[in-house]
Amino acid sequence: MKRGLGIAVSCTSYTIAVVTLLTLNILVYSIIFIEGSRPPLTIHYLAVGQADATFIETATGNRMLIDVGGGRSTADTVAGLLPFYDQRIDVVLVTHPHSDHMDGLVALLEYVDVGLVLDSGSGHTTGVVKDYLIALEENNVDKIYARRGMIVNLSREVKVYILFPDRNTRALDPDNASVWAKVKHGGNSFLFTGDAFVAIEEYMVDMDGERLRSDVFQAGHHGSRTSNSFDLLNSVMPEYVVVSAGVNNRYGHPHSEALEAFEYVGAEVLETPNDGNIVFISNEHGIERIK
Ligand SMILES: [Zn+2]
């Protein structure tokens, strides 16, 4: 009887071992499949209300965020996009120190490892900025100023070019000190200009002109009339414009003047309040909107 019981116990152990190994096997193959099937570049314009947050991932699994506005719910959304076994973001770019572009970062640092933060170096000091600086220090995250000429090598094929600021930003309004970044994969590109006003847009058009050309343009300042000049749109000539704004937001974003500029260049306008998260992939054939 004792022996029978022994056999029964060992059978149960054997079954558990087999099931565990099979489960692990499926898990490992799933991870290999996911890791092996990513396109060269995926960009998620997250629907985070009246704020900005864009998640970028390469085929090699390197990841970047451009802005992390929208508070803790954005941090939760970003963590949800990461596999449970690899809660890591390599680079976070904070275009400028206003809460709608950075107030999710402190919460994100509670459960996601961040490798490096780039910011504009604006001298703006508010409670949100102080919390941000403390959280970076407590989590030993290095922070450097983003400056024109820098290139973030996200992968061998995907590079992020910093176009602005080209100067010390202390004397600039924080919006105007916004970091401009162009994400490039082969001939495909995505432009980010933060909340910079028309004066900076004109300066950049004078300096870079057609080099600003991009397939996708994230509308400046959530689609405000204070940005998105015809001159800029004429240089960028985007196929798509993504407006990141809140549903029925109190600013009336996107403004009709901005929408006219987008229409003028024949761009298709996508808005997070209507479309939710907007996702593009980039491969050797061009860009494709997958969501
Ligand atoms: Zn903003």
Image (cartoon, grey):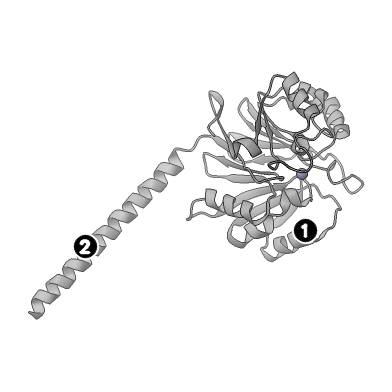
Q: Which residue has dot 2 on it?
A: 15
For the point 34% across and 55% down, which residue is it?
24
Image quarter where the C terminus lies is top right
Residue 86 appears at what percent x and percent y?
A: 51, 54
Secondary structure of the residue carrying tag 2 is helix
Determine the image quadrant of residue 158: top right
| Disc with the residue nearer the chain's start (2 vs 1) | 2
Spatial distance from mark 2 to mark 1, Cα to Cα?
54 Å
Q: Which residue has dot 1 on it?
A: 128
Decide: is 18 above or below 199.
below
Frontmost residue, 274 versus 38: 274
**Residue kind at label 1, given as amino acid type:** Val
Instruction: Residue 98: tell me if it is visible.
Output: yes
Left/right placement of residue 6 relative to residue 244 reads left
For the point 63% across and 51% down, which residue is it?
74
Secondary structure of the residue carrying tag 1 is helix
Image region (quadrant) for ligand 1: top right
Determine the image quadrant of residue 37: top left
